[in-house]
Amino acid sequence: MSSVIAETIEIIKEKSPNPLEEIWIEDLVIGIFFTGVKLSTGHGGCAFTPVGEMPEAVCCPTSAARMPSAGHLEGKSVSEMINYALDPNVLKSAIGIATLNGLSQSIVESGNERAYEVVKGRDGFDLLDIQSHETVSLVGAFGPYIKRLKSMGNPFYIIEKNRQTLRPDEMKHFKPESEMKTAIEKSQVVIITGTAIVNQWETSGHYGPHRKPHSGCLFEKGGECDGWRANSELRSDAQDSETGRVCLPSP
């Protein structure tokens, strides 16, 4: 996942309508569930706050130690903040991804990005057009999509770090992170939650873009996803170059 983020950062630098050194963080909030930033351009971005990945979250002083610059990030250039997306500290990663989201929106609104069609008012799950015979891997326990998959009757896997997030009847679909590669190799469709990006899961194969981050490097790998559609085929090394489709729903 880190290689995808790194490629996305480079594309953001190339396509941003304004030099990143001239854009700064106007406001930043780390909440219990989501982290949000407002850029000096007026654009905003958000990402999942990975509280569960912070063992020190039960203690305020030690939690604050995970973000030593807390209270001093406003006014910082986004050229610095986007690199937080690659930081192994998941709290910093959330800030970096939220910043990339805001910058991506500014690129889309600039009208200069015409590499793909923006589809509004549709659920990304429906855009995938999953066939009844296809096996699906869901990376991250995304409740609404679990419900859809259960109603469809397709064979599917739920790859999740915290098995306690699943209901008893869903445990038969559960796969731990250690079995993710095997599960994906058996799947024709892969759905990845935005949380997996923040947590920097080491995923195998090629995946399509999240609804917000700029999608250039991901569309080069092909696929369809929430809010976006690519016309090219996805070629996944993990699937012996069989055609596949992927989707990254919002966190």
Image (cartoon, rainbow, N blue to C red):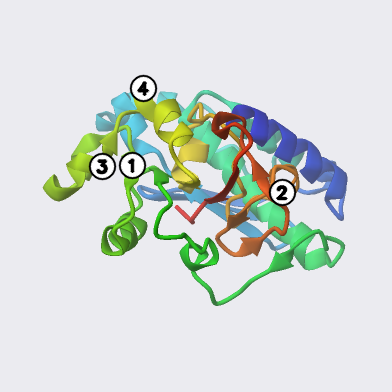
Query: In whole angstroms, how far apart are the C-alphas of marks 1 and 3?
Result: 5 Å
Q: Observer-nearest residue: 80 or 123?
A: 123
Query: In whole angstroms, how far apart are the C-alphas of marks 1 and 2?
Result: 24 Å
Q: Residue at x 56, y 41 (%)?
A: 95
The first of marks 1 and 2 along the sequence is 1
- Residue 156 place in picture, x, y as percent: 34, 46
- Residue 244 place in picture, x, y as percent: 57, 47
Label 3–label 4 contact, CB within 8 A: no
Q: Quadrant of residue 217?
A: top right
Q: Which residue is mark 2?
A: 219
Q: Amino acid at mark 4?
A: Ser
The first of marks 1 and 3 along the sequence is 1
Q: Amino acid at mark 2?
A: Phe
Q: Amino acid at mark 3?
A: His
Quadrant of the image for the N terminus?
A: top right
- Residue 213 place in picture, x, y as percent: 64, 50
Q: Which residue is mark 3?
A: 173
Marks 4 and 1: which is nearer the front?
Answer: 1
